[in-house]
Amino acid sequence: MSQPLDVLGGISAEQFLAEYWQKKPLLVRNALPEIADILEPSDIMELALDENVNARLIKQKDKDPNQWSVKSSPLIKADFQKMPKLWSVLIQAVDHYSFDLAALWKKFPFIPQWRRDDIMVSYAPQGGSVGKHFDFYDVFLVQGYGHRRWQLGQMCNADTEFVAGQPLRLLPEMDIHFDEVLAPGDLLYVPPGLAHYGVAEDDCLTYSFGFRMPNVTDMMDRVSDKFLENSALKNPLLDIIRDQQSAIGQVTENELEYLKTKLFEHLQNSNILEDAIMSLMSEPKYLDNIPEAEEIGTGDLEAVLEQGYQLLMEPASRLLYTEQDGQLLFWANGEAICTSDASASYLKRLADGELILLDENLADNDILEDIAHLLNESIVMLAPTDDAE
Ligand code: SIN
Ligand code: CO
């Protein structure tokens, strides 16, 4: 991991993680030149009208560009008529629609899969932007087409005030300490909280490789869901604390301590915490983006062994594992999955982003059954060798 990486402009992942990640911005010229050939503005305009995508159309009034409007998907042709001069369209999770784009996550092997959110693409004509703002997450902004001028400002936090009365969380001002124009292939890492403002210099596509991190509320929520699934926990606890009398209105320290201890016991002496957290982290961003699979059986798989097919992760799905007492445990799309020991090493490789050749090594009934299950649930997909690479 300590070798210099082109995507980081020749610094190592180690140095990036120690000095930049979550701390300060990094500009890398020509970090991802291959991104320039993936999509053009017309592809984005077409995608924006697809009823399944998650898109936002952001406009600024011609008479007063400080007045913004946002329309969320589904977007229709009429939304793009009588356009003002300044506008942007943003489409989430374009990596679920383009395998070439999804494959670019591999350029960031130093950040684990569970931290990935999605790749958003924005299109804007000259002057278009989404305003001065900050995000709570890390993002690699990569220029795909045309040019965008990026200005970076101060660090913000949950107390930062926004411009009143607008549909976006816009910053009233920015203390600019960075001002650069990005060309196709250039990358700008922006840490959480850093004010940024990107304005299209010409017809421009910008990709945001966004990352996510669970919050305590969501983790608690999943823990409580897991407790609710266990009906035995709905029975009242035993009252073993009636050892002394107290004032009628009081809950004694002892009593509270007993009740808290019972709660902590259940949190600590079960695998609920691990299950809840892993379930949350493996939840897909857009469930609807996961395609319906064509039912496949072990016989079908046997028939295509050595026929030039590979297995790979379905881009809209999530497959994660953890290791406990030397055993690999897997979660996919929000749920724990049970697989045979024989399949564990293959599943691990798939979750690590590897492509697995469907060859004689997989000719084992347990393995084929597990693969069929993963395919039927659209956790992994099958692709001809040539297409998948
Ligand atoms: C954009 O691409 O216009 C906005 C991306 C961002 O600011 O996070
Ligand atoms: Co942003």
Image (cartoon, grey):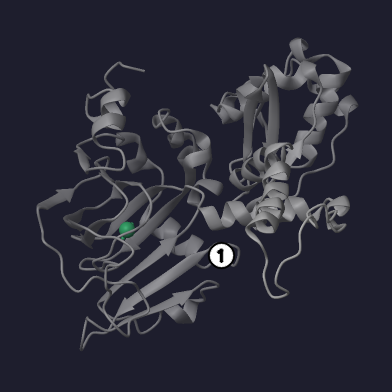
Q: Amino acid at mark 1?
A: Asp
Q: Quadrant of ligand 1?
A: bottom left
Q: Which residue is mark 1?
A: 50
Is 170 displayed left or right of 173 in the figure? right
Q: Is residue 251 visible?
A: yes
Residue shown at the point (52%, 71%) measured from the top left: 73
Q: Residue furthest top?
A: 361
Q: Nearer the viewer, residue 379 or 227?
A: 227
User: Residue 13, image x and y in percent?
Assistant: 32, 25
User: Residue 307, image x and y in percent?
Assistant: 73, 19
Q: Is residue 291 visible?
A: no
Above or below for 247 versus 64: above
Q: Residue furthest bottom?
A: 63
Instruction: Residue 26: name its quadrant.
Output: top left
Instruction: Residue 301: name its quadrant.
Output: top right
User: Residue 32, image x and y in percent?
Assistant: 31, 35
Is 306 displayed left or right of 39 in the figure? right
Is 47 displayed left or right of 307 in the figure? left
Instruction: Residue 62: name its quadrant.
Output: bottom left
Residue shown at the point (36%, 40%) measured from the top left: 35
Residue shown at the point (25%, 37%) measured from the top left: 20
- Tell whether circle 1 marks a residue whose Cβ is less than 8 angstroms from ligand 1: no
Q: Secondary structure at mark 1?
A: loop
Above or below for 377 versus 66: above
